[in-house]
Structures are given as structure tokens and as C-alpha cells.
Amino acid sequence: MEKKRLISGITSTGKMTLGNYLGAMQQFVELQDEFEMMVFVANLHAIVLPIEAKVLKENIKSMVALYFACGLDPNKATVFLQSDVLEVTNLAWILSCNSTIGELERMTQFKDKSTKVRADNGTNFIPTGLLTYPTLMAADILLYDAQAVPVGKDQKQHIELTRNLAERLNNKFGEMFTIPEPIIRENGAKIMDLQDPTKKMSKSSTNPKSYIGLLDDLKQVESKIKAAVTDSENIVKFDVENKPGVSNLMTIYSCITKKTNSQIEEEFKGKNYGDFKAAIAKVVIKLLQKIQDKYQELFNSQQVEDWLEQGALKARTIAARKLQKVEWKVGLKYKK
Ligand code: AQP
């Protein structure tokens, strides 16, 4: 039986965080044996908000090496750079022409990010790409006939839109797209900011204490965990509403150790937050040490460039076939 195809990507707006790892990358690695996994570095998504060319280049290079350092196997997963497949922007345009401004404006990510841009720079500086981001994301998925998309909780609404667009075009022009399902893990789907545990941990956050980068200095990682916001109760208990900081740290600990919340509560019964944070720092540092050692080995290696080229070739072959079919169906091509 053919394996189900899964696709996902991470935006190269910064260095990958523990949130990206636990919400997305860890899943990709676990799923690569059972499914046909396609994973890309989303560099086209990264230019939605202004980013320096030099920084973007560094982010891409470091992210590619990190993908493999985190455990993606080039013999199992197809790893590629989003902009290496030109077909994706063609399909994104077709999807944009079949979506409405209203439905794109309703996306939570657009609302949050445009509010922030407005506050920082004024109303006239909201890039069009911020609004059309979800149609590019839909193209990323539909171009490869992916049956499922492993993502963090924040991307669920975009997958819902992708499904709607696929159904809309299938009905209007005839069957052409596979309708994708989201795969969202229960634990770790939303790792929160260490300084404000009501907000998602984000790699573009301006406060470095609020997130753990996979490439952070390990001493700093320890201090960031020690400085993470908790509460004054000194009781390790999972209660997102009343103890968001402690619950977030429990989630991080649980995702890495695979212990359940009740096992963790039992483990730290009668102990204080100092002990709890020291235990979390220990497992996070052990995980990052392993990733960073592998990263050092891979960064600058020709092997990584070769794997990426090999991934792009495979992705382009699938994409070209699909785009031809779509262009024929919508009437852009007049010769078969
Ligand atoms: N904090 C998080 N917890 C769990 N999952 C997360 N993801 C991101 N942050 C968390 C998941 O990682 C994948 C790639 O996300 P992305 O980088 O493409 O975009 P994002 O969701 O906007 O992530 P960031 O870090 O917040 O990026 P910036 O700062 O650029 O906006 C997705 O599956 C996402 O759900």
C-alpha cells in the first residue's frame, strides 16, 4: 500500500525555537518512518514582513542544517527550499484569485500580526503578503497532494482555509485537489512564551528571554528556564488557566521525557520550583546538546547542499505535474 504523503514547513524568520521543535519538528521526525514526509524551509513566507537579506540567508542555511540535525533523514524525508519550486507561486496566484479579502482578513494570524505592524509603523505599512500568506500556504500543501499536514495549533485555521479553497476549486473546475487533514498533537501543540505564558513562544519575539532557541548557548538556556515566569504557590500542578507558566514548563518537560502530567506532579510533590526548573533545564540542555553537536558537524557540509538539491528535484517533479493539471482545468493552458 502506498504511504500517505505529509507536508509541512517552518518559516525562516529567525532561529528555530523549542516551540517549533516540540510543536512541529519532533513530529516530522517521528512521522518520517510511517509516512512519505515532505518538509521545506519556508523562505517565501519569511519575507512577508521586512527582513534583511543577509539575515534571511543565514537563517535559511542554519535552518536546513538544523532540520537534519534534529533527525530528518534525507533517505526518508524530502527536504527542500520553498523558493526552489517556482510552481508554488503560480498556484498561490490561482488560489488568491479564488479567495476573498474578507476570508483572508478573518485569519487570526493576519489580525494579530497586522495589529502589531499597525502599532509599530502605522496603518499604511501592512504588506499585501501578510494578507495573502494563507493562500501561499494553501499552495504549499495542495501542490503536492498532501493528505495531511503536521502543524502546531496556531496553524489550524490556515489548514481549514486550505480545505475550503481546495473544495471550492474542485467544485468549480472539476476534481484536482486532495483535501488535507491537519495533524495536531495533543501535547506540545502550543508552547508558550517563557516571560508571558499567555502568548505563544515565537522566534521573532524581541525579548530573547521569552524563547529558547535550538542554537542558544546552553548556559543561557539554563538561565532562561530559571527566569521563566511561574507563580508564588511553589506547587507543580497542571492548570493552564490559573498556573499558565508552570503548566507550560510541565508541557516542555512532558514532551521531552514523555512523562504524563500526573507523573510529573507526583515527581515534584513537596519540592519547590527551583528543583522543578533545574530538572527541566537538565533535559532541555541534554536535548539541545545532541542537536547542536550534530548541527556543528553538518553546517558548511557539502552533504547538506546535496540533500537539498536532491529534495528540490523531487519536489519540482511532483509540483510540475500538478500545476499542469491545474492550469489545464482552470483554462490557463489550451493544449494538453
Ligand atoms: N510556540 C509554538 N508551539 C508549538 N508549535 C509551534 N509552532 C510555531 N511556534 C510554536 C509550529 O511550528 C511550525 C512552523 O511555524 P512557523 O515558523 O512557520 O510559523 P509560526 O507559527 O508563526 O512560528 P513562529 O515561531 O511564531 O514564527 P514567527 O515568529 O516568524 O511568526 C508550525 O507548525 C507552527 O504551528
Image: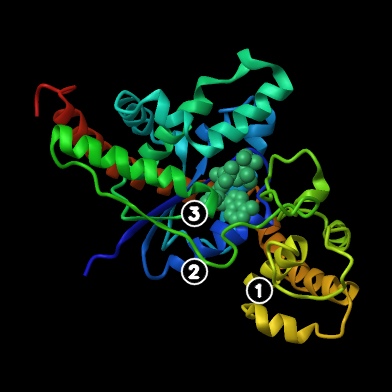
Q: Secondary structure at mark 1?
A: helix
How many numbered marks does the figure carry? Answer: 3
Q: Quadrant of the N terminus?
A: bottom left
**Residue type at the position of mark 1:** Ser
- In this rendering, the answer to whether 139 lies above or below 118 is below
Q: CA distance from mark 3 to mark 1?
A: 18 Å
State the residue lying farthest toward the front: 242
Q: Earlier in the sequence, mark 2 or mark 3?
A: 2
Structural crowding at the residue carrying mark 3, measured as other residues with C-alpha within 10 Å and reported as few (<14), some (14–19) or many (≥20):
many
Query: Residue 275 appears at what percent x and percent y?
Result: 87, 77
Instruction: Identify residue for label 1.
Output: 254
Label 3 lies in ligand 1 vicinity (Cβ under 8 Å): yes
Q: Earlier in the sequence, mark 3 or mark 1?
A: 3
Q: CA distance from mark 2 to mark 3?
A: 13 Å
- In this rendering, the answer to whether 257 lies above or below 18 is below
Regarding residue 329, the answer to whether it shows in the image is: yes
Residue at 69% x, 39% y: name it.
204
Residue at 85% x, 63% y: name it.
231
Query: Residue 79 appears at what percent x and percent y?
Result: 46, 51
Would you say 334 lies left or right of 116 here?
A: left
Q: CA distance from mark 2 to mark 1?
A: 16 Å
**Residue type at the position of mark 2:** Glu
Q: Earlier in the sequence, mark 2 or mark 1?
A: 2
- In this rendering, the answer to whether 75 lies above or below 327 is below
Q: Nearer the viewer, residue 312 or 142?
A: 142
Q: Which disc is residue 30 wearing?
A: 2
